[in-house]
Image (cartoon, rainbow, N blue to C red):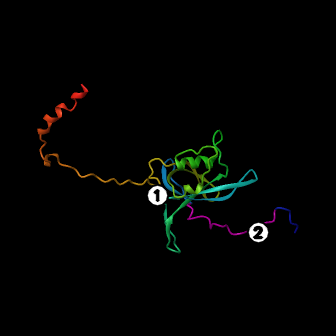
Amino acid sequence: MTDIDGLHVTVTKGDRSNYVGKFFSGKIEEDTWHSAELTKIISGESKFKDKTSPAWIWIYTLLDASFSYTDSESGEEGQYIITEKSSQKFTTAPRESKAYVRYCQLKGAEPTVGEEINLTDLFGTKCKLMIVNKPGNKIIFHNIEKVSIKDIELKKKTKKVKTKVKEKVDIKATAPISNEDDEDDEDIFADLM
């Protein structure tokens, strides 16, 4: 049998060591927000029109109770995850990259051109996701349509400043004020007039 260049491959087992949970494979209710946490962003690849380019894979843990599981073999409990890919471009308007848009949505602010940022700062950010189901050949794909942190308790809480409350003085309990010294004070401003 003649081997045709580029069509000979070796089957290998997929590597999921970078992932941090089990993928949710069923339908997710659409047109509603789902609580989530950005768990990790890993490097990967994206293919488009036979071209492979570097990508980031954004891993979200679904926090709603309906997305919890118990592993039948190990008995381990956890929350399902979903992922989305973005290019590794980080560009602002007029053509904002998906990574830039997600960063802004998760941070609640827009970085300025030339600013150095670290995407690991986003890990652990609580958010809410709007998801659309896209049926595939054997599985259902979950496209994340919107991400928001509005009305979500933020990961980094501000420190509460403790202040000492001064002792209250009960005016009624103090000694009565005497008017005896008032007569001496009448001439205090006499030289100014």
Magenta-tinted stretch: 7-24
Q: Residues within 10 Å of mark 1 (few under 14, many from 20)?
A: few
Q: Name the residue under label 1.
A: 64
x and y, in percent, of residue 56 in the image: 64, 55
- The numbered dot on residue 87 is none
- Please say if the residues under marks 2 and 1 sit with CB atoms less than 8 Å apart: no
Residue at the extreme right of the image, as rendered: 2
160 relative position to 171: left or right: right
Q: Residues within 10 Å of mark 2 (few under 14, many from 20)?
A: few
Magenta stretch holds residue 72: no
| Amino acid type for the residue under numbered disc 1 | Asp
The residue shown at (63%, 40%) is: 93
Vertical side of 187 occupied by 150: above or below = below
| Amino acid type for the residue under numbered disc 2 | Thr
Using the image as rendered, state which of residue 110 and residue 188 is in the foreground.
188
The residue shown at (48%, 58%) is: 63
Residue at the extreme top of the image, as rendered: 193
Q: What secondary structure is found at the residue carrying circle 1?
A: loop
Using the image as rendered, state which of residue 158 and residue 46 is in the foreground.
158
C-alpha distance separating marks 2 and 1: 40 Å
Q: Name the residue under label 2.
A: 10
The residue shown at (52%, 54%) is: 28
Magenta stretch holds residue 10: yes
x and y, in percent, of residue 4 in the image: 86, 63
Which one is earlier in the sequence, the residue at label 2 or at label 1? 2
